[in-house]
Image (tube, rainbow, N blue to C red):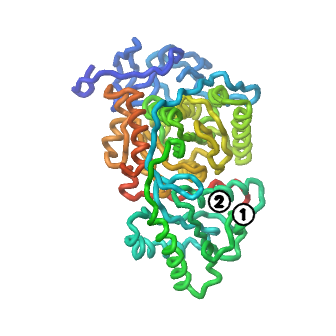
């Protein structure tokens, strides 16, 4: 077959024997009258990642991808047609009652060899993958002054301490003007508290407050020591505020500069998984490869967490089947119920998740997106479930309940103790975190080539025939260890890209 005079081998991808649709894998899509390997001919040009009907659909027929119903035809759809999102009626979300657990639990065999990384040891027994000076704010009012001080610290002090990677201000829009004991207020408070004790901060605590805020030190589990806390209302003018912050930072930089990497078992590493700017190839290339890497991490003893409630809600039956215990199943249901109610209060439902970019990339609805998203969790049993912002408690695979928004999810995963985040993308995003590196995995070779200095791993080679899912998964696994050990830098860290931390605050603002 030729397209504009160029010889093209048609690529179409069917994910499950039960599927009655296939998706186009070619970079530029395929023209009308192309004969696909499934024995059908395209009726019209179909873009990359978009679905093609493998049968004649009547109105109301189930449309199946990943072996699951992703929608129902709302009109007749002839075989060979490009199926657009407007042609599907979304199914109801799975009922949360009577979900079984433990029916698909197959423990992964641990590796016989010991895998390690090079990390910074902390007094509490944890290890860091970066050596950072962290400064927490107890209220948004102080952000401007702290920002000025941080720039001064970076310019005047940081060069004197070559073993310290960076200075990070934990800024947030919280602390006052809120219902501090309102329903849901425990989430942002817990998040700030756990961000402050992130292992990359080396056990150092420095809090900058105003002095009259509602978010008091006892809520942050902070002491009253003058060496740990500074209230701006106690200082005489701007210059003294800045000078005091700089002096307090200097004390900590001197201690942090003495930290050295040592060999640590992978059981001390926590890896977060997330996707953003997803397309229909996410569930074909990048997410399955990350899922394989997640299994390797679990076998090596690490802690792995996946998140994004609205991107697992429609596949929750697949997750409860992997719940190691009834307690884990009940916790999964608890978090789904909480989020269903949260969305309902806002007159929204899980369908609000899917973006215009997702649809342009071939994802018709949140059901299809969810099924592709879940794949990145691999096959390991789910051993624990975290409410938003709680710390990881167990090695193995954990579901950390968070919204799906990249910035909020990343912030909550950091609060849970994430050392490194593996982030898959089909549409592309330069998103990065200052507290932990973000390893980018592209679903398509064209994206990897277009963003050659932003994408770290190209999973598009799976479609191109240049690598298998397992080979890319092993590449990701090795990259995680190298990045955690400081032997490799992600592209986003190379450029110094840093997105803001964004708290999840469902509580009232007064």
At a point 44% along the width and 24% down the height, the residue shown is: 23
Q: Which residue is mark 1?
A: 219
At a point 47% along the width and 37% down the height, the residue shown is: 114
- Considering depth in this image, is 192 or 226 the residue closer to the camera? 226
Q: Residues within 10 Å of mark 1 (few under 14, many from 20)?
A: some
Q: Position of residue 33 (x, y in %)?
A: 34, 18
Q: Quadrant of the C terminus?
A: bottom right
Horizontal placement of 146 versus 320: left or right?
Answer: left
- Kindly identify which numbered label has been placed on residue 193: 2
Badge 2 marks a residue whose secondary structure is: helix
At a point 39% along the width and 30% down the height, the residue shown is: 48
- Kindly identify which numbered label has been placed on residue 69: none
Tell me whether circle 1 and circle 2 mark residues in contact (CB < 8 Å).
Answer: yes
Badge 1 marks a residue whose secondary structure is: helix
- Considering depth in this image, is 55 or 105 the residue closer to the camera? 105
Q: Position of residue 1 (x, y in %)?
A: 27, 19
State whether residue 265 is above or below residue 90.
Answer: below
State whether residue 440 is above or below residue 108.
Answer: below
Query: Do we see residue 280 in this rendering?
Result: no
Horizontal placement of 234 versus 300: left or right?
Answer: right
N-terminal of the pair, mark 1 or mark 2, is 2
């Amino acid at each position: 077959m030729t397209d504009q005079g160029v010889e093209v081998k048609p690529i179409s991808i069917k994910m499950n024997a039960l599927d009655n649709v296939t998706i186009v894998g070619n970079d530029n899509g395929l023209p009308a009258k192309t004969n696909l390997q499934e024995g059908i001919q395209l009726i019209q040009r179909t873009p990359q990642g978009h679905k093609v009907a493998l049968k004649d659909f009547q109105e109301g027929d189930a449309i199946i991808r990943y072996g699951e119903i992703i929608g129902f035809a709302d009109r007749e759809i002839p075989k060979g047609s490009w199926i657009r999102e407007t042609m599907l009626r979304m199914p109801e979300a799975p009922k949360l009652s009577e979900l079984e657990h433990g029916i698909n639990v197959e423990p992964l065999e641990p590796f016989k060899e010991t895998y390690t990384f090079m990390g910074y040891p902390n007094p509490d027994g944890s290890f860091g993958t970066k050596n950072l000076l962290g400064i927490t704010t107890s209220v948004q009012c102080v952000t401007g002054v702290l920002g000025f001080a941080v720039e001064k610290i970076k310019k005047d002090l940081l060069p004197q301490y070559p073993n310290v990677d960076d200075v990070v201000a934990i800024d947030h829009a919280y602390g006052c003007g809120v219902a501090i004991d309102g329903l849901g207020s425990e989430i942002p408070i817990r998040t700030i508290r756990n961000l402050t004790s992130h292992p990359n901060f080396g056990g150092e605590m420095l809090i900058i407050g105003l002095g009259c805020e509602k978010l008091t030190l006892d809520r942050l589990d902070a002491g009253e020591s003058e060496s740990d806390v500074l209230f701006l209302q106690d200082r005489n003018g701007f210059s003294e505020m800045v000078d005091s912050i700089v002096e307090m930072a200097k004390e900590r930089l001197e201690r942090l500069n003495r930290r050295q990497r040592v060999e640590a078992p992978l059981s001390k590493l926590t890896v977060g998984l997330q996707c953003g700017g997803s397309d229909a190839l996410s569930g074909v290339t990048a997410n399955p490869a990350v899922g394989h890497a997640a299994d390797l991490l679990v076998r090596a003893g690490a802690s792995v967490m996946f998140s994004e409630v609205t991107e697992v809600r429609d596949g929750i039956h697949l997750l409860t089947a992997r719940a190691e215990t009834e307690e884990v199943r009940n916790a999964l249901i608890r978090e789904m119920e909480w989020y269903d109610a949260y969305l309902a209060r806002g007159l929204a439902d899980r369908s609000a998740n899917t973006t215009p970019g997702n649809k342009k990339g071939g994802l018709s609805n949140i059901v299809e997106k969810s099924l592709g998203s879940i794949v990145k969790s691999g096959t390991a049993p789910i051993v624990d479930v975290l409410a938003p912002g709680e710390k990881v408690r167990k090695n193995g695979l954990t579901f950390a309940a968070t919204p799906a928004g990249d910035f909020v999810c990343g912030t909550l995963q950091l609060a849970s103790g994430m050392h490194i985040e593996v982030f898959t993308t089909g549409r592309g995003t330069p998103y990065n975190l200052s507290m932990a590196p973000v390893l980018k995995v592209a679903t398509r070779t064209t994206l990897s080539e277009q963003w050659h200095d932003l994408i770290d791993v190209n999973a598009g080679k799976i479609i191109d025939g240049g690598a298998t899912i397992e080979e890319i998964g092993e590449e990701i696994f090795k990259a995680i260890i190298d990045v955690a050990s400081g032997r490799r830098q992600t592209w986003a860290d190379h450029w110094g890209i840093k997105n803001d931390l964004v708290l999840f605050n469902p509580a009232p603002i007064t």
